[in-house]
Image: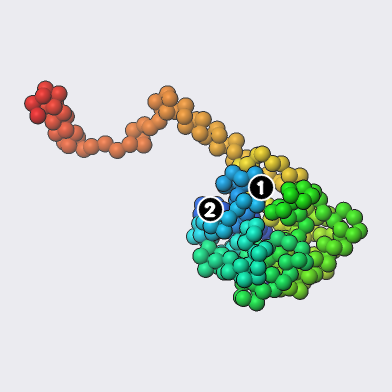
Amino acid sequence: MNVQKLSNMKAKSQKISAITAYDYSFAKIADDAEIDVILVGDSGAMVMFGYETTSPATMEEMLLMSKAVSRGSKKSLLVGDMPFMSYHTSIEDAIRNAGRFIKEGGMQAVKIEGNRTVAKTISAITKAGIPVMGHIGLQPQMAKSWDGYRVHGTNYLSAKQLIEDAHELEQAGAFCIVLEMITEEVSKIISESIRIPTIGIGSGRYCDGQILVLHDLLNLNDSLHPKFVKQYADLKKQSQKALTNYKDDISSNNFPTSAHSWSLEPSELKKLQKYFGLIKKNKL
């Protein structure tokens, strides 16, 4: 998968599948499942590092996860999520940090949160040869500080601004835009009025593709239950059950068994037993 193929999918009305991943093992699983786009999301700050929000994620933490994901995925389009304050201070910092995702992290593109105010940054990074995915609507990096985790595009003025923002980001050179928690009607208008693909998360049926946080989809982190998440497996419950059974087997001496162990050849065992007998008799 690459940027051009993703664009072709929209032109052919083929839906795009995207998921977050943060390590080698799950990246390989997603790649084997032929997921189109893997985003190394700054949501890893919460589900992997235990922060309360995505904001504390650092470049070093994001690069650590990116390197692992790039080793596990060979077919999906890999996108690195630029963390808070990695692209805000200057255009130069933004280009430099985006470049690190490509050179060090093994990513093929980066994602930037923000409305039309980040258009110049997107343009500069794109001109430096790095594809950029935009992200409008709910912006988790700053949502808690400003207006919380709410739905966007719920009135005319808000809807108009989102539509204009999407067009601004397209003109700036973004190859794709994530629409997060935007009303379905507004997402439909955006998706139909821009040429680049839209990837929805909590933004309804009419986006060109969908993305979910891996840990939400698999219920590996049940502290949050967003309305827009469809749970496809309950790995937390299954994992807890497996670990409880593991502990019980150890306690009851049911694990390990001979099936999980190796034994000496009879002749070698006999020599060892003779040797051990001498030790017990204090003859060695």
Indicate which label's residue lies in the foreground, 1 or 2: 1
Question: Where residue 164 sits: x, y (%)?
Answer: 83, 67
Judging depth in this view, the residue of 262 and 212 nearest the camera is 212
First reached walking from the N terminus: tag 1 or tag 2:
2
**Residue 153 appears in the rendering:** yes
Q: Is residue 95 shown left or right of residue 168?
A: left
**Residue at x 74% of width, y 49% of height:** 145
Q: Number of callouts in the render?
A: 2
Residue 23, label in figure: 2
**Label 2 neighbour load within 10 Å: few <14, some 14-19, many 20+:** many
* Callout 1 secondary element: loop
Q: Quadrant of the C terminus?
A: top left
**Residue 198 appears in the rendering:** no
The vertical placement of 269 against 146, above or below, is above
Question: Where residue 39 sits: x, y (%)?
Answer: 62, 58
Q: What residue type is labelled 1?
A: Thr
Q: Is residue 170 shown left or right of residue 97?
A: right
Residue 53, label in figure: 1
Q: Is residue 284 shown left or right of residue 109?
A: left
The vertical placement of 55 against 250, above or below, is below
The way the protein has been coloured in the rendering is rainbow
Question: Where residue 154 sits: x, y (%)?
Answer: 87, 53
- Residue 223: name its quadrant: top right
Judging depth in this view, the residue of 246 and 169 nearest the camera is 169
**Residue at x 69% of width, y 73% of height:** 123
Q: Which amino acid does label 2 sit on?
A: Asp
The vertical placement of 244 against 131, above or below, is above
* Callout 2 secondary element: loop
Q: In which quarter of the image is the N terminus?
A: bottom right
- Residue 6: name its quadrant: bottom right
Name the residue at the right extreme. Answer: 156
